Image (spheres, rainbow, N blue to C red):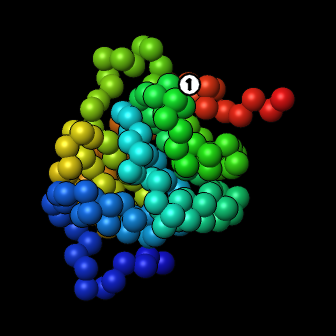
Amino acid sequence: MSTTPPDQDAGPRAVSGREDIAEARLQLLTAARYKLSIYLPSLPADIYNSLAELAELRRIATSGRGAEIRVLLGDPANVLREGHRLIDLAQRLPSALQIRVPSDDQVENRTTSAWLINDTYGYLFLPDADRVEGRAAMHDGPGLAPLLLQFDQMWERAVPATQLQPLGL
């Protein structure tokens, strides 16, 4: 069951500005039940780092046996240097929250866009992750399909981000 207010348009809409994008991201996280797919060329400190976003990510990761949060991260070395609460959460919940890096043979297919896909046909797509404009939808299967297909293809060839895993000494 989606927690989206019934009066809110579920179709694609333009988003711009940090607050608008953060609101769309939180709405999509809140609407998700068991699965998320996230592609990020980099992980800035201001995204997936608020207490509300982390609480939703934790809720999804612990929602049951089918819980799966897949994150494709383009620059894990920078995230490791800077530190990020999403990485801390992934280290505590490694069976549900997995982080991978696009493989070397995918260099030509890497993109500067970023997206979040949930399991209720919602998505947030930023054509250029460094710009604060894109589109979001709470329920748009046709708009989501090409993003999910591209993500799945990249995920299959990606390698685990072992540098982000705890040492376990």
Q: Position of residue 64 (x, y in %)?
A: 68, 63
Reading the image, the residue beneath label 1 is: 159
Q: Is residue 26 above or below residue 49?
A: below
Q: Is residue 109 above or below residue 51?
A: above
Q: Is residue 76 above or below residue 119?
A: above
Q: Residue at x 62, y 50 (%)?
A: 89
Q: Position of residue 23 (x, y in %)?
A: 32, 66
SS assignment at label 1 = strand
In the foreground, 63 or 55: 55
Q: Is residue 34 left or right of residue 168?
A: left
Q: Where on the picture, by quarter, is residue 67? A: bottom right
Amino acid type shown at disc 1 = Val
Q: Is residue 159 left or right of residue 115?
A: right
Number of marks: 1
Q: Residue at x 67, y 43 (%)?
A: 91
Q: Residue at x 57, y 42 (%)?
A: 87
Q: Does the image show residue 160?
A: no
Q: Residue at x 70, y 58 (%)?
A: 65
In the foreground, 57 or 158: 57
Q: Is residue 35 left or right of residue 65?
A: left
Q: Position of residue 151 (x, y in %)?
A: 40, 38
In the foreground, 55 or 126: 55
Q: Position of residue 142 (x, y in %)?
A: 26, 55
